[in-house]
Image: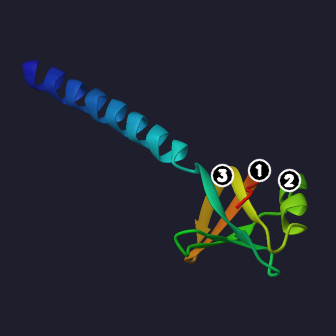
């Protein structure tokens, strides 16, 4: 009986750990980047990382700012080594 209770307790602990770590992984998707908008619907961040700009209302506004530096906040998704930012807010950064 004690052994069975130990397995149940271990299983519950494992479920709690998985739930907590998956929540952290989801939170990592939201971030703010600062970089220059180029003519290819991308933001080249200050660290050289290239982000495709996702197609939504804010993203469409940002791609019209080609050549300007912006600070963009949104969720980042990565697929096949390519990062896409779905912008939720942005501001033009004066140099």
- Mark sitting earlier along the chain (1/2): 2
Q: Residue at x 85, y 53 (%)?
A: 58
Residue under pointer 2? 58
Q: Quadrant of residue 41?
A: bottom right
Q: Residue at x 71, y 54 (%)?
A: 72
Q: Position of residue 36 (x, y in %)?
A: 71, 70
Q: Quadrant of residue 39?
A: bottom right
In front: label 3 or label 1: 1
Q: In the rendered view, does 2 fall on the left or right side of 61?
A: left
Mark 2 and mark 1 in contact (Cβ < 8 Å)? yes
Residue under pointer 1? 90
Q: Position of residue 32 (x, y in %)?
A: 62, 51
Q: Position of residue 8 (x, y in %)?
A: 24, 26
Mark 2 and mark 3 in contact (Cβ < 8 Å)? no
Q: Which mark is residue 37?
A: none
Residue count near mark 1 (Cα–Cα under 10 Å), binned few <14, some 14–19, many ≥20:
some
Secondary structure found at label 1: strand
**What is the CA distance from the residue labelled 3 to the residue labelled 2?**
12 Å
The foreground one among 91 and 76 is 91
- Mark sitting earlier along the chain (3/2): 2
Residue under pointer 3? 75
- Mark sitting earlier along the chain (3/1): 3
In front: label 1 or label 2: 1
The foreground one among 31 and 21 is 31
Q: Residue at x 29, y 35 (%)?
A: 14
């Amino acid at each position: 009986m004690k052994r069975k209770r130990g397995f149940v307790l271990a299983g519950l602990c494992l479920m709690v750990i998985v739930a907590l770590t998956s929540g952290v992984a989801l939170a990592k998707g939201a971030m703010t980047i600062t970089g220059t908008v180029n003519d290819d619907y991308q933001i080249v961040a200050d660290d050289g990382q290239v982000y495709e700009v996702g197609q939504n209302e804010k993203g469409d506004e940002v791609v019209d700012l080609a050549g300007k530096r912006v600070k963009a906040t949104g969720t980042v998704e990565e697929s096949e080594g390519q990062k896409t930012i779905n912008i939720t807010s942005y501001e033009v950064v004066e140099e």
